[in-house]
Image: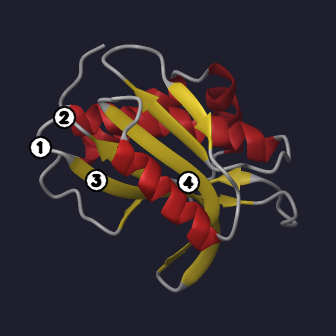
Amino acid sequence: MLRLDGMSACIELAGFAAAQAVCCLFDRIPLPPLAFSRRGAGAPTVTILSSGTPSEVAAQGSRWLEVNADQADEAVVVYDGYVTITGIRRDALVLELRAYRQPVAEYRMAVPYRPHRDPDGFAVYRPKFIVRTVEEHDGAALLEAFFRGVSSHDVGRRIWQTCADQGW
C-alpha cells in the first residue's frame, strides 16, 4: 500500500476506525470511546477508553493521544458526539487524529450520521474535517485515504455502502 505521508496514513486509520464505529451504531450497540494506533504497516491496535461525560471522554482521548504509549506512527480516537455545520446539529462520530511522524500533525474529523430513531432510518453522511483546514494537503487524496481505510474493514465497508447518504 502506497503511503503519501504520515497524515495520509493517519486518515486511512481514521477511516478504519470510523468503519468499526459504524458497525457498532448499525448494530445499535452503544459506542464506547475507542482508540486505534498503528506502527508501520502493522495491523491497528484497538483500546477501549472509559466512558463519561463528553468533556471527560474528549480529555481522556487527548491524554491517550499525547502519551502515545504504543509508540505508534499514527493514532485515532473515535467517540459518539455531535457536530454543527451550517447551523444544523447532527449526531456524529468525532475522530481525533494524530500523526506522530515528523512533522507531528493533529486533525479532527466528524462523520455525521442519522440514528436509527430517525423516521428515515440509519444513514452515514460524508466525513467532514473540523477545527483545522487541510489546505496544505490535497483534500481529494485525503478523502481517498479515508475511504481506503473504510474499505479495509470488510463489514464496516458493506454497512457504509448500504447506509451512505451523501446528501449532507
**Nearest to N terminus: mark 3 or mark 4:** 3
Residue designated by label 3: 106
Q: Amino acid at mark 4?
A: Gln
Q: Amino acid at mark 2?
A: Arg
Alpha carbon separation for disc pair 3 and 4:
26 Å
Mark 4 Cα-neighbour bin, 10 Å: few <14, some 14–19, many ≥20: few
Q: Quadrant of the N terminus?
A: top left
> In this picture, is 127 found above or below 85?
above
Mark 2 Cα-neighbour bin, 10 Å: few <14, some 14–19, many ≥20: some
Residue at (83%, 66%) from the top-left corner?
Answer: 118
Residue designated by label 2: 101
Front tag of 3 and 4: 3
Alpha carbon separation for disc pair 4 and 2:
32 Å
Q: Badges 3 and 4: C-beta atoms under 8 Å apart? A: no
Residue designated by label 1: 103
Image quarter of residue 54: bottom right
**Nearest to N terminus: mark 3 or mark 2:** 2
Mark 1 Cα-neighbour bin, 10 Å: few <14, some 14–19, many ≥20: few
Alpha carbon separation for disc pair 2 and 1:
6 Å
Q: Position of residue 123 (x, y in %)?
A: 71, 52
Q: Amino acid at mark 1?
A: Pro
Residue at (32%, 55%) from the top-left corner?
Answer: 107
Q: Secondary structure at mark 3?
A: strand
Is any part of residue 127 visible from this angle? no
Q: Secondary structure at mark 1?
A: loop
